[in-house]
Image (tube, rainbow, N blue to C red):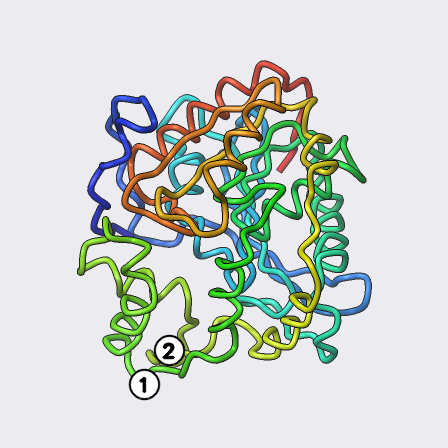
Amino acid sequence: MNQPSLRPRSTHEIGLQATALPPIPDKQNWRDIYFTARDGLRLYGRHYPAPGSRLRPVLCLAGLTRNSRDFHDLASVLSNPKVANARHVYTLDYRGRGNSAYDPDWRNYQVINELLDVLDFMAMRELADAAIVGTSRGGILAMVMAAVRPGNIGAVVLNDIGPVIEREGLLRIISYVGRVPLPATWREAAELVRSLSHRQFPAVPDQMWESIARQWYGDEDGRPVHGYDQALNKTATILDGPLPELWPQFKALARVPVMALRGETSDILSTETAARMQREHPDLTLLTVSGQGHAPLLRDQPSLVAIRDFLARADATWTGHHVA
């Protein structure tokens, strides 16, 4: 559906001239996918088809409490059949998020279980040497995947995540996981999301907050419902000790091209960590998205163009064949 656009304040930082993109479709342009995890849980994903495409497919992985809806604009741009470089895009709802079933045991909401679900989904869809777009938690999964199953990854976009996660930012996120009240109307939802996020996202115009709220929350009979299992807040015990750094996992990405997006006001990915990532990776493109924090929404035109063009360059290493 057509959405109001973020002001293109990131053009200078990204170093690109924003080029026209086709409008986002106002009707469903994806196929629903339901599959069964190895422990019997019913999980959900989306496929944005690009009929006849021979380009590297993309798998989008969301943040801790987020879901497939976060990637609708990006997936629509990348899969648009009216452009020459269209590619298949897949998105996945982790267990307990979006349209996937809630796990009866909250202890299973851990990176290792989510990674197994992702790998099973990739095997089912025959996604090898794929491009991974990982926002926050999704980027962590991409780094770990690079270490344990390198053949699955051919290119990576890390959206506001790196090997060092700033504790202050993570504490901020954990403070509201499972603790935000359920709004009664979409107007209330928009105001709640704006109040929680506007300091980190000064570039977001007022009229966009309701569409962002519709990413956060599900819709049941025209009313907002929780977009994730509220039991996720119990996983906050991971903060009892020091946060592990993921430099070995990040270095496992050295064999593939990487793009790292950092929100200008991010409190998760510091400028120091981003600079070190650029020094230590032989082929890393670092982009700053101004007026946005953790994590960039992947709706503004400069970011969409940058990711599209990065994936096109990364296709130079694609020798596979994906049958959707």
Do tag 2 and tag 1 residues touch (Cβ < 8 Å)? yes
Question: Which of the numbered marks, if any, corresponds to residue 212?
Answer: none
Q: In the rendering, at what x and y percent does residue 162 appear?
A: 58, 41
Q: In the rendering, at what x and y percent does residue 323 appear?
A: 65, 33
Q: Residue at x 77, y 54 (%)?
A: 116
* Circle 2 SS class: strand
98 to 252, vertically: above or below: below
Q: In the rendering, at what x and y percent does residue 75 appear?
A: 44, 42
125 with respect to 276 (left or right): right
Q: Quadrant of residue 207?
A: bottom left
Mark 1: give few (<14), some (14-19) or many (20+) Cα within 10 Å: few
Mark 2: give few (<14), some (14-19) or many (20+) Cα within 10 Å: many
Total marks placed: 2
20 with respect to 27 (left or right): left
* Circle 1 SS class: loop
Q: Residue at x 61, y 18 (%)?
A: 282
134 with respect to 36 (left or right): left
Q: How far apart, in angstroms, are the residues tagged by discs 2 and 1?
A: 7 Å
Q: Amino acid at mark 2?
A: Pro
First in sequence: mark 2 vs mark 1: 1
Q: What residue did someone put label 1 on?
A: 184
Q: Quadrant of residue 54?
A: top right
**The C terminus: image quadrant:** top right
Q: In the rendering, at what x and y percent does residue 258 appear?
A: 57, 28
Q: What residue did someone put label 2 on?
A: 224
Q: Of residues 300 and 263, which is closer to you in this image?
A: 263
Q: Quadrant of residue 211?
A: bottom left
Q: Amino acid at mark 1?
A: Ala
Q: Residue at x 54, y 37 (%)?
A: 273
317 to 304, vertically: above or below: above
Q: Of residues 271 and 142, which is closer to you in this image?
A: 271
